Image (cartoon, grey):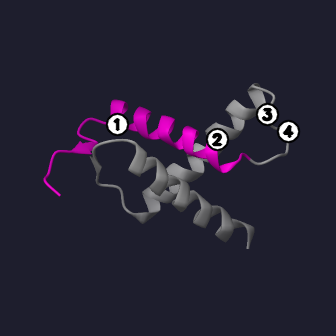
Amino acid sequence: MHIIWTVVVGFAVGLIARALVPGRDDLNIAWTSALGIAGALVGAVIGRTLGLYEHNEAAGLLVSVVGAVAVLSIYRYVVPGATSSKPS
């Protein structure tokens, strides 16, 4: 059940990050969930580095979204053509 909850929260965090970063992405549900989960992991590392979280504590929603925005920005920078210029 913990894995299902992680995927659901990761998907929500990924959707929020995609809404905050301008541009159109061609990410499906699985990649959006992976973006959110990776963002939560990055956010947790940042939070632990800043002393906001203990060693086994999960990141909060805000820090997870910040991490997901960072992951999405890096993804767009590294992957050529990641941002689609197709009209919506």
The residue at 23%/39% (across/down) is 81
1 or 3: tag closer to the N-terminus: 3
How far apart are the two marked residues, 1 and 4, measured between alpha carbons? 30 Å
Look at the numbered disc 1 and give the secondary structure of its residue. helix
Reading the image, the residue beneath label 3 is: 52
The residue at 73%/33% (across/down) is 47
Does the CB distance between marks 2 and 4 fall below 8 Å? Answer: no
The disc labelled 3 sits on which kind of residue?
Leu
Look at the numbered disc 4 and give the secondary structure of its residue. loop
Q: Which image quarter is the C terminus in?
A: bottom left
How far apart are the two marked residues, 2 and 3, measured between alpha carbons? 10 Å
Reading the image, the residue beneath label 4 is: 55
Does the CB distance between marks 2 and 3 fall below 8 Å? Answer: yes
| Neighbours of disc 3 within 10 Å: few (<14), some (14-19), many (20+) | some
How far apart are the two marked residues, 1 and 3, measured between alpha carbons? 28 Å
Reading the image, the residue beneath label 2 is: 63
- Viewer-side residue, 39 vs 15: 15
Task: Spot the residue most to the left.
Answer: 87
The disc labelled 1 sits on which kind of residue?
Arg
Task: Spot the residue most to the top.
Answer: 50
2 or 4: tag closer to the N-terminus: 4
